[in-house]
């Protein structure tokens, strides 16, 4: 009798172990065999070039995992209640750009109090780094600034065409309280360029930026046409003797 009970327990325990093994095998079968691989399973399978991307999924891995815009070298210049600032904007994606996007610069004062929000819009080519300049009147001492981006709709580099502009006869001089960077923009293309933005930078002999400003040529630039520009820059009087006229420069961007 005791032997029968012992044999029964062995069968019982053996059955439980068998059930556990069967359940494990069923789970493996269900996950790896029964369920067909998809482009939404968060697993790199079915000849995908990355996780859920590649030709088999109909979307390139770069497009699926596009990197965000980033900014650096944010600099703020103050003259009375006028604030001029610039930052370097970088698009790290080699095959995608933005035809139009929006940005907001939030300026903060003491105790992180929001003093003003400056809104703007721009564009950026694939793998481009460009300088953004903004000027605004602000009440209160600016302690810090934060930049955010919106209206982000990435487009393939195939949708962008190269625009060639020539910056001619650029010179820097002083007129009254303002420094002026002037020159001519020539359209080297066989098509109309509807808008050109010229950012101006006053530099010292060590290539430090003393002040920034910009001008916007809103009227279209016809094919192979030229148009004069002037960028007016005011700086703290204490910096005026440090201006190196030969080092002052511009950055030019066109919309289309």
Image (tube, rainbow, N blue to C red):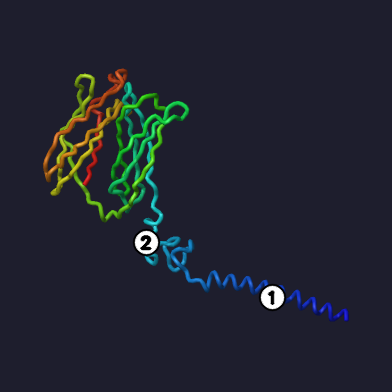
The quadrant the N terminus occupies is bottom right
Q: Does the image show residue 84?
A: yes
* Residue 253 image-quadrant placement: top left
Of the pair 111 and 211, the residue shown nearer to us: 111
Question: In the drawing, what numbered circle is on residue 18?
Answer: 1
Residue 114 percent location from the top left of the image: 42, 31
* Residue 72 image-quadrant placement: top left
Residue 139 percent location from the top left of the image: 36, 24
Which residue is at a point 34% across and 48% down the rendered structure image?
A: 152
Q: Earlier in the sequence, mark 2 or mark 1?
A: 1
Lateral position of residue 203 relative to residue 52, left or right: left
Mark 2 falls on what kind of element?
loop
Q: Does the image show residue 206?
A: no
Category of crowding for the residue at label 1, using alpha-carbon neighbours closer than 10 angstroms: few (below 14), some (14–19), many (at least 20): few
Question: In the drawing, what numbered circle is on residue 39?
Answer: none
Lateral position of residue 89 relative to residue 197, left or right: right
Mark 1 falls on what kind of element?
helix
Of the pair 74 and 241, the residue shown nearer to us: 74
Category of crowding for the residue at label 2, using alpha-carbon neighbours closer than 10 angstroms: few (below 14), some (14–19), many (at least 20): few
Residue matched to label 2: 59
Q: Residue furthest right?
A: 1
Residue 161 percent location from the top left of the image: 22, 51
Of the pair 23 and 178, the residue shown nearer to us: 23
* Residue 15 image-quadrant placement: bottom right
How far is the residue under mark 2 from the one under mark 1? 44 Å
Which residue is at a point 39% across and 24% down the rendered structure image?
A: 141
Above or below, comparing residue 44 to residue 94 in the picture: below
Residue 105 percent location from the top left of the image: 36, 36
Above or below, comparing residue 226 to residue 191 in the picture: above
Lateral position of residue 20 relative to residue 186, left or right: right
Figure disc tally:
2
Contact check, label 2 and label 1, Cβ < 8 Å: no
């Amino acid at each position: 009798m005791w032997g029968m009970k012992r044999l029964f327990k062995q069968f019982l325990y053996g059955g439980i172990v068998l059930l556990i093994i069967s359940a494990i095998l069923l789970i493996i079968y269900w996950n790896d065999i029964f369920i067909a691989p998809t482009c939404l399973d968060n697993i790199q399978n079915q000849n995908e070039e990355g996780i859920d991307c590649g030709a088999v999924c109909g979307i390139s891995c770069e497009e699926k995992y596009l990197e965000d815009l980033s900014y650096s070298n944010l600099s703020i210049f103050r003259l009375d209640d006028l604030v001029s600032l610039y930052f370097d904007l970088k698009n790290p994606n080699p095959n995608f750009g933005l035809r139009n996007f929006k940005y907001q610069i939030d300026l903060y004062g003491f105790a992180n109090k929001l003093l003003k929000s400056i809104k703007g819009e721009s564009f950026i080519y694939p793998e481009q780094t460009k300088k953004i300049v903004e000027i605004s009147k602000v009440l209160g001492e600016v302690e810090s600034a934060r930049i955010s981006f919106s209206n982000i709709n990435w487009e393939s580099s195939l949708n962008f065409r190269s625009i060639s502009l020539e910056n001619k006869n650029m010179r820097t001089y002083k007129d009254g309280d303002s420094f002026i960077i002037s020159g001519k923009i020539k359209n080297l293309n066989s098509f109309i360029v509807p808008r050109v933005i010229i950012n101006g930078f006053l530099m010292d002999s060590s290539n430090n930026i003393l002040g920034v400003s910009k001008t916007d040529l809103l009227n279209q630039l016809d094919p192979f046409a030229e148009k004069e520009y002037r960028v007016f820059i005011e700086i703290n009087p204490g910096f005026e003797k440090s201006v190196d006229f030969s080092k002052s420069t511009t950055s030019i961007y066109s919309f289309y």
